[in-house]
């Protein structure tokens, strides 16, 4: 279906798009051709420039150089409304819906002309009917699940009758079934309406499954292009990373691909997940125990709903689940940021009060947060100060900071954890994401914790750094630290965990040991389907 | 281990040497001055005579620079308190009221208690400090108990404080001066006894209160505490990221209350010092605070919360005030000084903001994914 | 004050008190309505105090020089807008801290108004009372609401207009969205900072009108102390109302009532400590804020500057 179209001028063509942020090239001389009737996968690691490219095409980022052509004609896309007028639609990764507004208001947002609620509602019903994306126009977005939100997002995009659709990591918050549904809608549109679709992902399987053509980006440049039919995993992985990658690492590095995994029934990566054979663990007394934890958001939604779990000494317990099902609340709880309405947290049998400053840290819980800029590091403070954070013994003398001791301490951690920085006094904000993450890990592990909570520890990191994080977590477990790994990335969970819990709407809805790993059951549990085996009992 | 990725560090645009910033400061301050001059001109005065009057009143005329130092004292102290609050992430802007509370405590000690001068003086200063701090504790309570923004509550409390002072000085059993022979007809408190005064330093024909030395020491102390102690580190940590602070064992409510208390305490101390240095004839009056609280706040903002930088800024503001006293002779209303001052403040706000924006455009700090800017 | 219930009953049954409550409430409502729009867009616009004062002076000066009440009100609106323009552009173009900007502007306006007042000595004047036929005959509230100076009715028109703008126009939708989630609004193609500036301008116009109303529709003369911190009470009214239009108006009316009570007490011959009365509006506002603030969810983007890509 792709070959006969190659002679036509592409529906949309990016020619030499370049964007610098300071000395760093986010995109450099990027060429990309989107053909009508094709889904074009754009693959690359985090930081490869995929999102910047999409944002330039959609008019959100002004390119330093380069032009866009539509059907051969040069066009200037200066802002999103212009893009929409020219038939470009975009489904964003985050941030594009306003929680406090209703569905119809969100869909009307960014359009032009008089605001007409009734016509907008009618239009939403019409489009949702034609794509089978049913949604209540008067529902408030705040009350919707991640899957329905994504639906609204897509309706918002489709409602403007785009010919070109840009999707930026669209499946990151979807269950497998929802992802499959999304790709069906896209495929229908591509076949019947002749859409040109750009699908941005760092997920190899998803790209292989859903696209006709693949462009691989690395360090802001297009490094290779493939026809999907001819593409092979090792070659794609090598193009992404820039060096041959052992397949084990590949499997560990591609996030959130449960969706594509379910679509790919014959998965060539499957066997890789099964080994190495698990070392049988002796049941050990729990180091971390959470009992019947309950909490509610200020606007009355349940975050944690009677959640209980235990983690034993040296055990890695993975918590799987679709984003937004209580992971952040759980991590916040263990960071001492959340006060429980009911239930308690015990470390080695002793209660650690929730929501009390420093109590969790004091009880021996260290956290590697998902959003390190919110809870992990302090931009604007130095690397040394970030490594110290808190009142470490030996760092002060009669209330005064012992600056030399702090410096030495920082230097030793910088060395031990391989943090690349000009020095301990550099502002942490000037370090790369990977090195900021190393700083977080260094601080977490250097406090000799009894429990380590790792929430999406490899999000936004490149392959090398992901490998590093995995090694550190395994090593910590070897040293007897109880590890709670919260991740939406099933590969990460499966490759590291001894036991997996599934989180849904703030509750643990299922549990399986390493021997019982069953992807299909995991997927169903994550989507909220009741655990059949529990019913059988 | 090896990292296959590109430069993990890069030139920091914020510290890159640049002529732009000083230039921007020059332009925007120049603009503010021209605007002020224009304002003076359209109201029919010569701006050069205004400038001369300001200079005479603040420095050149005999005894004036000592006066300027005295005036700068409470401004500087208020500013230092503000710095502590803002560094910890709290915006107490009710200094005008807290200052009055400090002065009230001093006046009570001075007129109601008997004892030796120095003892009363020190008691008064201490109680002034505490009552300013407690008054700032109300916004702290409202903020940490109920989530009321301290910006609004501290502001509203200023207006309550005015009435408290009004009540104090009009009520016989409280502070009202019953003496029919008092120098002014206005209702005031009784004067502080002469024994309760901060010593005055005489230098080259100028006089200034020892409070100024105290304020300078305080500036050094604040710089030291914020930069070099664990306590200061915790305050800064709280201001930079409250979740990280909470995790590290810095209680938002407790440390925040301390920060707000300190910012109010500084204002209270400033008020007590003003009274003990003989401001308004060492009497509590209706207009006693005289916008010193506001000015201290602005000084802190202009100094971008650097304690030592507060010193020259406070001196500048004080000079504009004392210079303003000479304006009447030039036939210009002294309120023009307020205008010049505020224009200067606005002008000084612009360059760092522009600089910040330029940095953002040049390159975002590494964000989470490294690419979604 | 021997018979407190009797005295209170006396005060609260006095028709004059309600008329005065409406007048004072209207003054606050002008500012609070504008502040509501600004806060919906994500700004706590402290400079509303400055806009009110500037509006009062602008109104008085414009009335003095033209003799026209309409032009007087327009002059107030212009003056209020000028202040809000500085505030909006400093906060949402240069992204300077909005509190810093607001405080500075209030000091600037206070100085400027003092200076211009000393230079020009504005007088001001008072609009006539217009009783609306039929409406003013409604028992109990009719006279208080509908037998007022005519600029009062301007507010009555502005209430539905503001509601319509906020909830029925695309502009209002965009204003609400930039206050709730500026990133989402941005990727939806809305110029976030532009909308925020416009919302502040709207707040400036209304506060300016409110200031002019104070001089021309209520007091009848200009005084530099006339506003005296009531801009901050207008902000409190928005908090009181939980960021709803109805609640904000209720807040303005409640605080107006307290103000009226304060004025009515001595007029009706009761002796209450003058300072306590003067402090009452502020004290009550504080108490109300203490009990009310936690009950509402504020706009999620309130008081946070927006820079594309920033958080």
Image (cartoon, coloured by chain):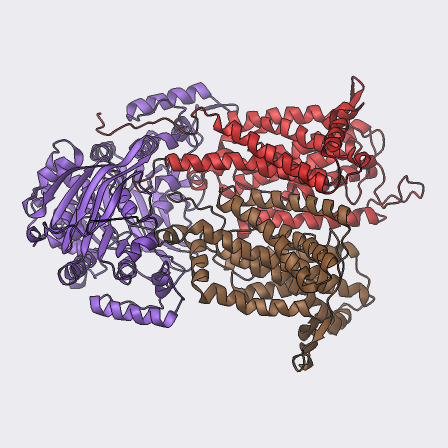
Question: In which quadrant will I find the N terminus of chain B?
Answer: top left
**Residue A65: image location, x then y, percent:** 29, 38
**Residue B140: image location, x then y, percent:** 58, 45
**Residue A28: image location, x then y, percent:** 25, 36
Q: Residue furthest right?
A: B181
Task: Report the front residue among C308 and A405.
Answer: C308
Q: Colour of chain B?
A: red
Task: Report the front residue among A403 and A202.
Answer: A202
Q: Colour of chain C?
A: brown
Is A365 placed above or below A154 here?
A: above
Question: In which quadrant will I find the C terminus of chain B?
Answer: top left
Which chain identifier belongs to the purple chain?
A
Is residue A503 left or right of C199 when viewed as pictured?
Answer: left
Is residue B126 left or right of B176 when viewed as pictured?
Answer: left
Q: Residue furthest front?
A: A73
- Whether residue A281 is visible here, answered yes or no, is no
Q: Quadrant of residue A458?
A: top left
Task: Report the front residue among C238 and B21.
Answer: B21
- Whether residue C170 is visible here, answered yes or no, is yes
Q: Quadrant of residue A202?
A: top left
Taking the spot 11% from the left edge, 37% from the top edge, the residue there is: A247
Is residue B23 left or right of A141 when viewed as pictured?
Answer: right
**Residue A463: image location, x then y, percent:** 20, 35
Is residue C11 left or right of A216 when viewed as pictured?
Answer: right
């Amino acid at each position: 279906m792709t070959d006969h179209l190659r002679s036509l001028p592409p529906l949309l063509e990016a020619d030499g798009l370049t964007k610098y942020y300071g000395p760093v090239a986010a995109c450099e001389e990027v060429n990309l051709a989107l053909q009508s009737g094709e889904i074009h996968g754009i693959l690359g690691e985090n930081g490869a420039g995929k999102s910047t490219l999409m944002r330039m095409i959609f008019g959100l980022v002004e390119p330093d150089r380069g032009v866009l052509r539509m059907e051969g004609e040069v066009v200037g896309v200066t802002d999103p409304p212009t893009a929409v007028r020219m038939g470009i639609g975009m489904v964003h990764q985050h941030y594009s819906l306003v929680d406090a507004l209703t569905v119809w208001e969100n869909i009307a947002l960014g359009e032009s002309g008089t605001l007409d609620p009734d016509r907008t509602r009618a239009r939403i019903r019409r489009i949702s009917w034609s794509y089978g994306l049913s949604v209540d126009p008067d529902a408030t977005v705040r009350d919707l699940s991640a899957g329905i939100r994504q639906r609204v997002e897509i309706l918002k995009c489709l409602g403007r009758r785009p010919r070109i659709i840009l999707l930026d990591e669209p499946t990151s918050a979807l269950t497998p079934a929802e992802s499959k549904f999304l790709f069906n809608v896209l495929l229908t549109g591509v076949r019947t309406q002749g859409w040109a679709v750009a699908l941005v992902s760092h997920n190899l399987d998803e790209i292989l499954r859903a696209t006709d053509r693949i462009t691989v980006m690395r360090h802001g440049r297009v490094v290779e292009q493939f026809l999907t039919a001819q593409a092979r995993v090792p070659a794609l992985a090598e193009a992404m990373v820039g060096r041959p990658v052992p397949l084990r690492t590949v499997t560990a590095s591609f996030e959130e691909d449960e969706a594509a995994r379910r679509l790919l029934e014959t998965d060539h990566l499957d066997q890789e997940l099964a080994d190495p054979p698990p070392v049988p663990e002796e049941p050990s007394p729990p180091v971390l125990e959470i009992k019947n934890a309950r909490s509610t958001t200020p606007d009355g939604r349940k975050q944690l709903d009677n959640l209980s779990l235990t983690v034993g000494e040296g055990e890695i317990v993975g918590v799987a689940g679709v984003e937004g099902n209580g992971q952040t609340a759980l991590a916040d709880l263990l960071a001492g940021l959340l006060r429980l309405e009911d239930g308690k947290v015990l470390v080695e049998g002793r209660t650690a009060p929730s929501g009390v400053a420093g109590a969790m840290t004091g009880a021996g819980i260290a956290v590697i947060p998902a959003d390190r800029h919110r809870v992990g590091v302090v931009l604007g403070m130095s690397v040394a100060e970030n490594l110290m954070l808190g009142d470490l013994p030996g760092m002060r003398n009669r209330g005064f900071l012992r600056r030399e001791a702090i410096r030495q301490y920082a230097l030793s951690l910088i060395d031990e954890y391989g943090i690349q920085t000009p020095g301990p006094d550099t502002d942490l904000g000037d370090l790369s994401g990977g090195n900021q993450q190393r700083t977080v890990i260094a601080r977490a592990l250097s406090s000799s914790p009894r429990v380590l909570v790792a929430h999406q520890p490899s999000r936004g990191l490149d392959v090398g750094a992901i490998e590093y994080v995995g090694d550190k977590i395994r090593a910590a477990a070897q040293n007897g630290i109880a590890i709670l790994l919260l991740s939406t990335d099933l590969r990460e969970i499966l490759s590291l965990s001894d036991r997996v819990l599934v989180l849904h709407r703030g509750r643990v809805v299922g549990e399986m040991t390493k021997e019982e790993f069953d992807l299909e059951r995991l997927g169903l549990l994550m989507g909220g389907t009741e655990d059949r085996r529990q019913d059988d009992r | 281990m090896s990292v296959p990725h590109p430069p993990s560090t890069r030139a920091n645009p914020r510290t890159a040497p640049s002529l732009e910033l000083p230039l921007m400061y020059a332009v925007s301050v120049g603009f503010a001055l021209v605007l002020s001059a224009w304002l003076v001109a359209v109201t029919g005065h010569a701006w050069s005579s205004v400038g001369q009057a300001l200079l005479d009143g603040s420095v050149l005329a005999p005894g004036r620079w000592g006066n300027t130092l005295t005036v700068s004292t409470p401004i500087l102290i208020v500013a230092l308190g503000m710095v502590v609050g803002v560094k910890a992430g709290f915006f107490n802007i009710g200094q005008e009221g807290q200052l009055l509370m400090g002065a009230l405590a001093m006046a009570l000690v001075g007129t109601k208690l008997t004892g030796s001068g120095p003892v009363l003086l020190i008691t008064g200063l201490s109680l002034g400090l505490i009552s300013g701090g407690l008054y700032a504790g109300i916004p702290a309570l409202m903020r940490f108990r109920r989530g009321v923004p301290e910006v609004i509550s501290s502001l509203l409390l200023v207006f309550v404080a005015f009435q408290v002072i009004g009540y104090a000085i009009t009520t016989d059993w409280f502070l009202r001066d019953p003496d029919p022979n008092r120098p002014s007809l206005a209702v005031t408190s009784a004067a502080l006894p002469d024994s309760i005064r901060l010593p005055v330093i005489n230098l080259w024909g100028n006089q200034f209160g020892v409070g100024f030395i105290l304020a300078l020491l305080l500036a050094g102390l604040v710089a030291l505490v914020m930069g070099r102690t664990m306590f200061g580190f915790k305050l800064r940590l709280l201001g930079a990221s409250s979740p990280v602070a909470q995790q590290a064992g810095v209680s938002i409510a407790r440390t925040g209350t301390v920060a707000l208390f300190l910012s109010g305490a500084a204002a209270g101390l400033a008020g007590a010092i003003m009274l003990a240095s003989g401001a308004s004839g060492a009497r509590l009056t209706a207009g006693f605070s005289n916008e010193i609280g506001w000015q201290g706040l602005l000084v802190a903002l202009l100094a971008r919360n650097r304690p030592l930088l507060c010193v020259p800024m406070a001196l500048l503001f004080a000079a504009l005030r004392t210079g303003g006293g000479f304006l009447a002779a030039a036939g210009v209303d002294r309120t023009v000084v307020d205008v010049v001052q505020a224009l200067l403040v606005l002008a000084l706000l612009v360059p760092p903001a522009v600089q910040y924006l330029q940095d953002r455009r040049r390159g975002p700090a590494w964000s989470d994914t490294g690419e979604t800017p | 004050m021997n018979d407190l219930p009797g005295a209170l009953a006396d005060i609260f049954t006095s028709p004059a008190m309600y008329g005065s409550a409406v007048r004072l409430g209207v003054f606050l409502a002008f500012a609070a309505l504008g502040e509501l729009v600004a806060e919906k867009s994500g700004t706590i616009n402290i400079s509303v105090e400055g806009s009110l004062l500037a509006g009062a002076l602008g109104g008085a000066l414009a009335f003095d020089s033209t003799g026209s009440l309409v032009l007087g009100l327009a002059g107030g609106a212009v003056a209020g807008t000028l202040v809000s323009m500085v505030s909006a552009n400093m906060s949402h173009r240069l992204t300077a801290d909005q509190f810093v900007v607001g405080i500075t502007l209030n000091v600037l306006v206070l100085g400027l108004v003092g200076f211009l007042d000393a230079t020009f000595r504005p007088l001001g004047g008072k609009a006539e009372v217009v009783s609306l036929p039929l409406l003013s005959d409604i028992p109990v509230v009719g006279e208080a609401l509908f037998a007022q100076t005519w600029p009062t009715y301007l507010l009555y028109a502005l209430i539905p207009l503001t509601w319509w703008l906020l909830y029925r126009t695309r502009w209002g939708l965009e204003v609400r969205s930039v206050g709730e989630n500026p990133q989402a609004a941005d990727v939806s193609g809305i110029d976030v900072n532009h909308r925020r500036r416009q919302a502040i301008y709207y707040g400036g116009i209304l506060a300016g009108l409110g200031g002019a109303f104070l001089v021309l529709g209520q007091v009848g003369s200009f005084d530099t102390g006339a506003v005296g911190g009531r801009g901050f009470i207008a902000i409190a009214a928005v908090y009181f109302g939980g960021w709803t239009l109805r609640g904000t108006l209720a807040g303005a009316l409640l605080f107006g009532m307290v103000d009226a009570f304060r004025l009515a007490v001595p007029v009706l011959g009761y002796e209450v400590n003058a300072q306590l009365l003067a402090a009452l509006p502020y004290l009550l506002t504080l108490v109300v804020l203490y009990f009310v603030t936690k009950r509402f969810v504020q706009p999620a983007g309130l008081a946070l500057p927006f820079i594309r890509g920033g958080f």
